[in-house]
């Protein structure tokens, strides 16, 4: 993998990765700024997609079609949905699924999948990165929907539907488009909250500084690029 795309939804997620690139150039296209640079001997394209499935899917297809990336990584934060880890820990994607979609209808079209599975070599690279950074992590299931989850009742509904390890707003769209183009993908998510009322108060109402959690995901993403 010599050309890798990296997508983050928010500025805090993207700037940390952009600043690690050498020989950086940029191009604006379709409302996005794409940063191109070198990292660990690979050409890396980094962009901020914006939040939500449509924005993430559009950015993914743009990176594939315009720049010919050979793999894609999504780095960012998520709401924790499991007792196996805590806030500050990391979920590496094994499986990615929509929690707010009519999956049986979506899967009627290529790649005809109910959920999307990350590339094993990329998973192994991320595990190596977590070990190197002494990060507590699990390899698990990530669920995606277009709403921030900050209510316990909705959290429980999602758990009943697909029992994910974390929940966020972009990963399934990125994974879906990657699989549609036969491109390997990986999702790296640092837990910023527990997807409950306290999480909404922390991140939405008080607009808590998420840079600490983004930095953790960015560290792992960089090393993952190195080991891929």
Image: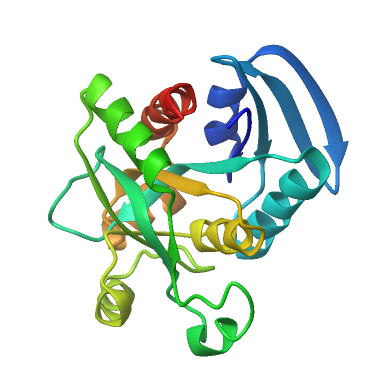
Of the pair 19 and 3, the residue shown nearer to us: 3
Which of the 4 image quarters holds residue 6?
top right
> What's the coloring here?
rainbow
Is any atom of residue 206 visible in this view? no
- The residue at 38%/51% (across/down) is 78
- Tell me the quarter of the image containing the N terminus: top right
Of the pair 42 and 142, the residue shown nearer to us: 42
Which of the 4 image quarters holds residue 209?
top left
Q: How many marks?
A: 0
Relative side of 227 to 94, left or right: right
Residue 90 percent coordinates (x, y): 29, 41
Relative side of 110 to 137, left or right: right
Which of the 4 image quarters holds residue 115?
bottom left
Relative side of 225 to 157, left or right: right
Up-down: is 43 above or below 114? above
- The residue at 43%/69% (across/down) is 97
- The residue at 80%/25% (across/down) is 26
Up-down: is 220 above or below 108? above
- The residue at 26%/20% (across/down) is 132
- Residue at the far top in the pictured view: 23
Residue 141 percent coordinates (x, y): 32, 61
Residue 194 percent coordinates (x, y): 26, 55
Residue 173 percent coordinates (x, y): 58, 62
Is any atom of residue 30 visible in this view? yes
């Amino acid at each position: 993998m010599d050309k890798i795309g990296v997508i983050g939804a928010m500025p805090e997620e993207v700037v940390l990765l952009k600043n690690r690139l050498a020989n950086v150039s940029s191009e604006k296209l379709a409302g996005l700024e794409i940063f191109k640079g070198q990292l660990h001997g690979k050409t890396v394209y980094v962009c901020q997609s914006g939040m939500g499935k449509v924005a993430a899917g559009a950015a993914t297809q743009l990176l594939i079609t315009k720049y010919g990336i050979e793999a894609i990584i999504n780095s960012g934060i998520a709401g924790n949905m499991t007792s196996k880890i805590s806030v500050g820990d990391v979920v590496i994607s094994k499986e990615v699924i929509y929690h707010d979609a009519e999956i049986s209808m979506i899967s009627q079209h290529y790649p005809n999948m109910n959920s999307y599975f990350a590339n094993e070599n990329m998973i192994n690279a991320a595990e190596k990165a977590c070990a190197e950074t002494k990060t507590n992590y699990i390899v698990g299931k990530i669920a995606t929907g277009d709403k921030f989850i900050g209510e316990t009742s909705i959290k429980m509904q999602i758990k009943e539907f697909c029992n994910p390890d974390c929940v966020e707003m972009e990963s399934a769209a990125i994974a879906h488009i990657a699989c549609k183009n036969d491109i390997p993908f990986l999702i790296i998510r640092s837990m910023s909250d527990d997807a409950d009322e306290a999480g909404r108060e922390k991140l939405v109402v008080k607009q808590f500084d998420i840079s600490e959690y983004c930095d953790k995901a960015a560290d792992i993403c960089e090393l993952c690029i190195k080991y891929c």
